[in-house]
Image (cartoon, rainbow, N blue to C red):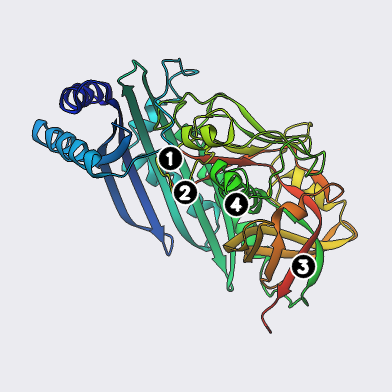
Amino acid sequence: MTTDLAAQAIELAVAKAGTGAEVEVYVDRTELALTRFANSYIHQNVAHSATSVRLRVHVDGRTATGSSTLIGDDGLRELVERTVAGCRLMPVDPRWPGLAPPSAAPGTGWLDEETVRATPDDRADRVAAFVAAAGGLECAGFCRTSMTSGAYVNSLGQTLSGAGSEASLDAIARTGGADGAARLASWRVADLDGAVLGARAAAKARAGVDPAELPPGVYEVVFEPGAVQDLISNLSFYAFNGKAVEERRSCVELGTDQFDPAVSLVDDVTEPGAIGLPFDVEGTPRHRLSLVDNGRSVAVAHDRRTAAATGGKPTGHSIGSIAFGPLTSNLGLVPAPGDPATEVDGPAADSSVLDLVAGVGRGLLVTDLWYTRVLDPRPLVVTGLTRNGVWLVEDGEIRGAVQNLRFTQAYPASLAPGQVRGVGTTPVTQPASWLGAAYRAPALHLAAWNFTGNASG
């Protein structure tokens, strides 16, 4: 459907814009189904299906973009007419980078038919397993399944299409005012084991009861994958974004050893089971992109505009926003080599977390970083709170739960040479806040994290 719709739209737009116009069309279709639960009961099942057409036209040095969800003949004609008319009213665009030339994408995406066909009962079964495994604790969260298909075509002859699926379960168990969280995302709904996640969340909640207050200060930390997700997603938004680099708002200095040798960051939609499409809204194929290689900053994400401005190459990470710039959407911290972790009880999520905890003299085990906000973008100083479980660690042993703390920390500085004491062996794909994206992270042991406040102030 998306391919035919893109072909129809490009034919109308080229005819309307006239000879010499550069035209591109991107069509995406999303089918999302969501099951929400609270107080250990399902309270909402919703489903949403939408198709959007994005049209960009460049004529006589001027560029205009339009979009519509009205995909009938009249809707497409109206989109074409107003976008072409708007193009004539726009100022000259001296930074127009041109359209993507014809080139192949590395595949068509990872699509699981069972996930596409998943029913409310399928999601309810996983919710029920989560609740049962929590052993009577109050539970809340969601289970979702989705499919995204996309097609791109332009007047230079570039044509791409693909589709991908996503399934995720993200929930908490609660007791005595303590929350324990567990979450997982995959391209296959079959990978979501509600019983495993429910048992993990319940164990963390029970271990978090009666937390002690800890004074602010600089502590060693072991971050579980959920906390690492926040760390690397902020690096994606504010550091390895080609627009931020162009505008000198980014800390990235290509070719320098900015990070500990244990740090390697890779955006890779080509690996088996990756979530998302292997091309962006500008029709640029996406290949494996190494941003940090053993501590050295080697690349940033580019769309066509930032690549042209900086002398780089487009990497397939356009989100269609000139204002915000390109973003990675499959970023992962490369795990340490080792055997896969096994499931264990207690506040730690897996054995690789416990291995990292064993190396802590005195510090904290942190489940999640929450409500994070950037205070200073260039050094990427961020403030936020811990959430869903924090525990004091002494001499490699978990001593007890502590209350949530506020932190103020420069994220790149926490990963600087000598600051990373260990990387877990088990990466976990985390549910992203928008479809077609995922962050994959193992646990992480850092030498220092600056906690600036507690419950007393």
Q: Which circle marks residue 400 in the picture?
A: 3
Nearer the observer, disc 2 or disc 1? 2
- Asked whether the residues under the numbered discs 4 and 3 touch, taking CB atoms below 8 Å apart as contact, a structural biologist would say no
Amino acid at circle 2: Phe
Q: Position of residue 297 (x, y in %)?
A: 72, 38
Amino acid at circle 3:
Gly
The residue pinned by badge 1 equals 319
Q: Position of residue 338 (x, y in %)?
A: 79, 32
C-alpha distance separating marks 4 and 2: 14 Å
Q: Residue furthest left?
A: 74
Q: Quadrant of the N terminus?
A: top left
Q: Which residue is mark 4?
A: 234
Mark 2 in CB contact with mark 1 (< 8 angstroms): yes
The nearer-to-camera label among 1 and 3 is 1
Q: Earlier in the sequence, mark 4 or mark 2?
A: 4
| Helix, strand or loop for disc 4 | helix
In the rendered image, which residue does mark 2 sit on? 324
Q: Indicate which label's residue lies in the foreground, 3 or 2.
A: 2
Residue shown at 48% from the left, 23% from the top: 285
Quarter of the rendering occupied by the C terminus: bottom right
